[in-house]
Image (cartoon, rainbow, N blue to C red):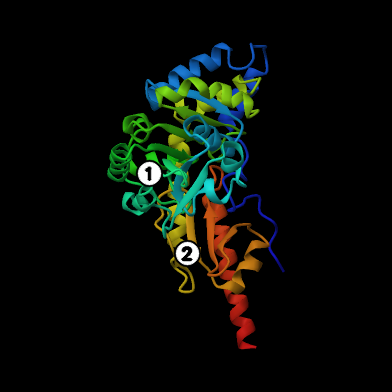
């Protein structure tokens, strides 16, 4: 008999609820009225305080979701005949339903990767036909930090990318849906990963990190930043009750809730990885540097396991799966999942014997 359905999911950190501290801050705001569209005192203070973490020259614009954040960053920086270069696994390429192409008209050029990371020498082939009117002109590189595989670019790797893009007149964007985990893994500040690198744009994630909704578009490029607010409005991403969005980032970043969330998520991911390594039938496929574990499971285990604990099959050909830790997943939840693996392994041993 299958065990009772647990309250948690290892499918995505989008599956979690809202962090109680964030919920309480939003609830408090409901007790009074305030001006709309970001002209309220709280939003003004929050954006000013966020610059202490992201850089004094940061132009900060809140939007509803991650697709909008990525597209708005690119739209602010790119012309329709230009191209963005990214890893073949990038969310921008695989999971935006063609939103960059539709809304900007730009071309997306992809680079192969085994761990989600790409290196400057991999994109040199795209730079040969600069000035050729028959070829979409490469203009921007986007790096996912941490990557879709939960791996992290080191500060040296990021500095190398910044130097390379400058030398080749390219712009640099960071897709930071889970950027806070990279800061934890590297034991550095958020500024070290953003304004300190003098990048051109950042998509700063909130929803995956315990917020109800919302991401922040951060533009550093002074030439482009003046137009961002107009593109945001055209993209239907200007929140009227902005204070409910900015208050969440106030808790997450300014009040440093992100440190608690990342410590919990990383530690629990490492614990899960260590437990999985106890099964000879399971192999860990990527370094554990954030709040995810990638592992290859026996094919026949996957369906019964997902009946009680949901997770995604990342690669249907190899049955590599992604196990994602949310801020509210507990060690007891992980122990339950490991218990399910043990139960299903024994069940299949019994079937084989029969």
> As displayed, is residue 282 above or below residue 110?
below
Judge whether residue 58 can be spotted in this image: no
Residue 113 rendering spot, x and y as whole percentages: 42, 58
| Residue at (53% x, 56% y) in the render | 323
Q: Residues within 10 Å of mark 1 (few under 14, many from 20)?
A: few
> As displayed, is residue 70 above or below residue 256?
below
> As displayed, is residue 43 above or below residue 332?
above
* Image quadrant in which the N terminus is located: bottom right
Residue 115 rendering spot, x and y as whole percentages: 41, 57
Using residue 352 as the reference point, say whether residue 194 is left or right of it.
left
> As displayed, is residue 296 above or below residue 331?
below
| Residue at (56% x, 51% y) in the render | 94
Q: Which residue is mark 2?
A: 276
Q: Which residue is mark 1?
A: 130
User: Secondary structure beneath disc 2?
Assistant: helix
| Residue at (65% x, 23% y) in the render | 27
User: Secondary structure beneath disc 1?
Assistant: loop
Where, by quadrant of the figure, is residue 49 drawn? top left
| Residue at (58% x, 12% y) in the render | 39
* Image quadrant in which the C terminus is located: bottom right
Judge whether residue 133 can be spotted in this image: yes
Using residue 76 as the reference point, say whether residue 28 is left or right of it.
right
Q: Are marks 2 and 1 in contact (CB under 8 Å)?
A: no
Residue 76 rendering spot, x and y as whole percentages: 50, 29
Dot 2 or dot 1, earlier in sequence: 1
Q: Nearer the viewer, residue 135 or 46?
A: 135
């Amino acid at each position: 008999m299958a065990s009772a359905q647990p309250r948690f999911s290892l499918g995505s950190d989008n599956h979690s609820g809202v962090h109680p501290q964030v919920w309480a801050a939003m609830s408090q705001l409901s007790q009074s009225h305030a001006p709309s569209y970001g002209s309220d005192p709280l939003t003004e203070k929050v954006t000013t305080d966020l610059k202490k973490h992201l850089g004094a020259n940061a132009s900060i614009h809140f939007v509803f979701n991650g697709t909008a954040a990525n597209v708005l960053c690119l739209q602010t920086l790119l012309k329709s005949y230009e191209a963005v270069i990214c890893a073949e696994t990038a969310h921008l390429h695989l999971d935006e339903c063609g939103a960059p192409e539709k809304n900007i008209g730009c071309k997306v050029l992809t680079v192969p990767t085994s761990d989600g990371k790409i290196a400057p020498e991999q994109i040199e082939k795209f730079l040969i036909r600069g000035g050729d009117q028959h070829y979409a002109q490469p203009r921007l590189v986007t790096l996912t930090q941490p990557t879709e595989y939960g791996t992290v670019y080191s500060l040296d790797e990021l500095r190398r990318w910044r130097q390379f893009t400058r030398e080749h007149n390219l712009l640099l964007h960071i897709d930071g849906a889970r950027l806070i985990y990279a800061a934890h893994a590297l034991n550095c500040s958020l500024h070290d990963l953003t304004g300190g690198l003098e990048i051109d744009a950042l998509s700063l994630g909130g929803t995956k990190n315990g917020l109800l909704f919302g991401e922040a578009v951060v533009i550093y490029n002074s030439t482009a930043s003046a137009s961002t607010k107009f593109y945001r409005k055209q993209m239907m991403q200007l929140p009227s009750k902005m204070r409910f969005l900015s208050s969440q980032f106030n808790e997450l970043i300014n009040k440093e809730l992100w440190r608690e969330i990342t410590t919990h998520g990383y530690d629990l991911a490492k614990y899960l990885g260590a437990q999985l390594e106890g099964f000879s039938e399971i192999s860990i496929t990527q370094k554990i540097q954030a709040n995810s574990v990638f592992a290859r499971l026996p094919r026949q285990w996957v369906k019964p396991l997902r009946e009680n604990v949901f997770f995604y099959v990342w690669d249907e050909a190899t049955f590599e799966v992604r196990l994602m830790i949310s801020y509210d997943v507990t060690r007891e939840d992980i122990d339950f999942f490991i218990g399910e693996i043990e139960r299903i392994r024994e069940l299949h041993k019994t079937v084989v014997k029969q």
